[in-house]
Amino acid sequence: MKVKIETEALFSIPMGYTTIPSEICNVFKTLKGREQTHGRTDIFNVLDEHPKIKSYITDVFTLWVNTIWGLKDQKWAMTTSWVTLNPDGSQMGMHRHFNCAYSGVLYFDKVDATHPPLEFLNPLKCLDGSFLVHTPAEKSNIFNRVGAFAPISEGQMIFFPSYILHSHPSFKPTDIVRKSFACNFFPIGKYGLLDSTVDTRCL
């Protein structure tokens, strides 16, 4: 049968990425982090003593997220921030972030070829009822893939919706420790429409 059929993506999940200047990454190298194998860190405010850096990262995120949403003056706040070190190559289990709208990850130090990038789980695959057979890897595309990978390199920062499940597999450790800074964001000020409006200044 000879039929021409066009396909479009009805909806799309955004991921932003940019390069953070080395002079800012150098500040992150001085921050206290926690090794991944020791469990979750209890330090979620590592940038509170570096307000200019915190403001810079927030401004970069705000520029990106307001552009994709078509917003002009929406303000955002960084709610939490922490540093994770992975010297032994342990796996990071699949998880998502709660009580926030977007999340960010920065690879502020050297990245080794063995360091795996974040892998995101496609939330749409959880809605299809798993009634389709598994798609061969060589046939993977944006419509049927189970997951996607984020770019990883020194100075690379990525932003993504916080509801996306993400993880990375274990890897063979080297002299270069896998280091990352992570943070979460939430809108502040006035946002929404009509009876669904929120103004955080009134709370």
Image: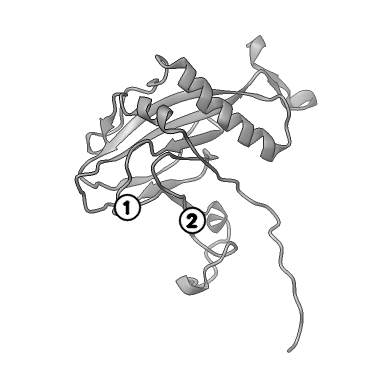
Q: Nearer the viewer, residue 62 or 163?
A: 62
> Where is residue 91 drawn, in percent x and y?
29, 48
Q: Position of residue 11 (x, y in %)?
A: 68, 52
Residue 142: which numbered mark, if any? none
Q: Is residue 26 left or right of residue 98?
A: left
| Distance between the alpha carbons at the discs numbered 1 and 2 | 13 Å
Question: In the rendering, which numbered label is found on residue 169?
Answer: 1
List the residue tagged with mark 2: 148
Quadrant of the image occupied by residue 62 = top right
Residue found 58% across the figure and 26% down from its top: 59
Quadrant, the N terminus: bottom right
Residue 138, above or below 22: below
Q: Nearer the viewer, residue 196 or 105?
A: 105
What residue is rendered at 42% in x and 27% in y? 24
Res. 132 image quadrant: bottom right
Task: Answer with mark 1 or mark 2, whichever residue precedes in sequence.
Answer: 2
Quarter of the picture holding the C terminus = top right
Instruction: Work out whether 93 lies above or below 48.
Output: below
**Residue 120 appears in view:** yes
Q: Residue at x 75, y 87 (%)?
A: 2
Q: Is residue 136 visible?
A: no
Indicate the secondary structure of the residue bearing disc 2.
Answer: strand
Residue type (three-letter) at the residue carrying disc 1: Pro
Q: Name the residue located 73 percent from the left edge and 32 percent from the top edge.
A: 71
Residue 96 percent coordinates (x, y): 45, 40
Disc 1 is placed on an element classified as loop
Q: Is residue 93 left or right of residue 55?
A: left
Image: 75 above or below 166: above
Farthest residue, direction right: 194
Question: Hey, what amino acid is under mark 2?
Answer: Ala
| CA neighbours of label 1 inside 10 A, class few (<14), some (14 to 19), many (20+) | some
